[in-house]
Amino acid sequence: MMIEVKHQELAKFILVGVVNTVSDFLLFLLLANVIGIQPVVANVISVGICMCISFVLNMKYVWKSKRAVRETAPRFFAVTIFSGWVVQGVIIWVFTLLGESWIINMVAKMAAIGVGMTINFLAYSMIFKEKPGSE
């Protein structure tokens, strides 16, 4: 039964992640490629907007957490800021050393998202899950 619940959480995390990632990716491309905002700055904006939506979806839908927002929000935002702004920002910056083009921006963001999602899943499971024996 524990394995089944774990798979349900992972499936929901992936679903929310896909919706959030597509939104983040499209917003990033709009900001960086259409509007012309520098890619690292475009990433900060797109991640910032999407992380707020992600918090609500992860807390209420994926993990169905009963923990207080004041307990989960600081941890969630710390992890997401680290993975989204720091880790993704560094990856995107490294790619921009190759030059700036639509394709480089797209590949950089996809690589950054992959690393960020891995960090997020591991951390969010610890943030939102109930402690054993607390139910």
Image (spheres, rainbow, N blue to C red):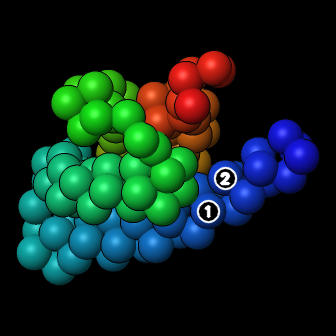
The answer to whether marks 2 and 1 mark residues whose Cβ atoms lie closer than 8 Å is yes
Tag on residue 83? none
| Quadrant hosting residue 14 | bottom right
Q: Is residue 8 left or right of residue 92?
A: right
Residue 1 image point, x, y percent: 89, 46
Seen at 73% across and 58% down, the residue is: 8
Mark 2, residues whose alpha carbon is within 10 Å: few (<14), some, or many (≥20)?
some
Q: Is residue 106 visible?
A: no
Q: Is residue 111 left or right of residue 48?
A: right
Seen at 31% across and 56% down, the residue is: 56
Cα–Cα gap, marks 2 and 1: 5 Å
Residue 40 image point, x, y percent: 22, 45
User: Nearest the camera: 62 or 31?
Assistant: 62
| Quadrant hosting residue 79 | top left
According to the image, label 1 marks what residue?
A: 12
Seen at 86% across and 52% down, the residue is: 4
Callout 2 secondary element:
helix
- At label 2, the amino acid type is Glu
Seen at 45% across and 29% down, the residue is: 127
Q: In what quadrant of the picture does the C terminus appear?
A: top right
- At label 1, the amino acid type is Lys
User: Nearest the camera: 44 or 60?
Assistant: 60
Residue 96 image point, x, y percent: 33, 45
Against 90, residue 59 (above or below) is below
User: Nearest the camera: 52 or 108?
Assistant: 52
According to the image, label 2 marks what residue?
A: 9
Q: Is residue 57 left or right of residue 2?
A: left
| Quadrant hosting residue 13 | bottom right
Mark 1, residues whose alpha carbon is within 10 Å: few (<14), some, or many (≥20)?
some
Callout 1 secondary element:
helix
